[in-house]
Image: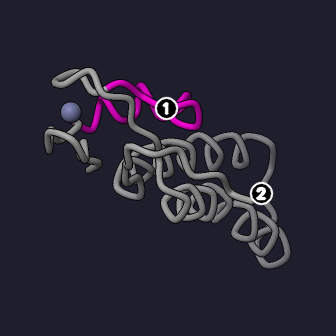
Amino acid sequence: MPTCPNCQHSFTWSETVRRSFKLNSGVKCPSCEQMNYPTKKSRTRSALVSFIPLPIILLSNLFYPLNWTGYAVFLIATFIIVLSLLPFTIRLTDKEEFLW
Ligand SMILES: [Zn+2]
């Protein structure tokens, strides 16, 4: 789980999931009110975790084609799995790092 680099407050899983959609713009620590930003490395890791389902869907279609219901169930299950794993990939820093 991400921790605040200033006060070592450990964000909970639900805090991280709720704020993960706006982590690119920074998140305020609820304990010390300091702005935190995801590290460059953790943003790359989060993007990789988010794209893991894509090759699985493409390869599964070659070997085991699914109908629309199967794809819907697969996408919902994948979304839940990725969302539950995402907080574990995030590390925070007090300085904003740009990808490029
Ligand atoms: Zn803090």
Across and down, in percent, residue 66 comes to 77, 57
Rendered residue at 41%/58% (across/down): 89
Residue situated in front as seen by the camera: 67 or 5? 5
What is the distance, in whole Å, between disc 2 and disc 1 at their CAs? 39 Å
Q: Which mark is residue 26?
A: 1
The residue carrying mark 2 has its beta carbon less than 8 Å from ligand 1: no
- Asked whether 37 falls inside the magenta stretch, the response is no
Q: Quadrant of residue 40?
A: bottom right
Badge 1 amino acid: Gly
Q: Could you tell whether 96 is left or right of 12 in the image?
A: right
Rendered residue at 72%/40% (across/down): 69
Which secondary structure lies at badge 2? loop
Q: Name the dominant secondary structure of the magenta segment.
A: helix
Q: How is the image coloured?
A: one colour
Q: Which residues are magenta?
A: 12-28
- The residue where tag 2 is placed is 66
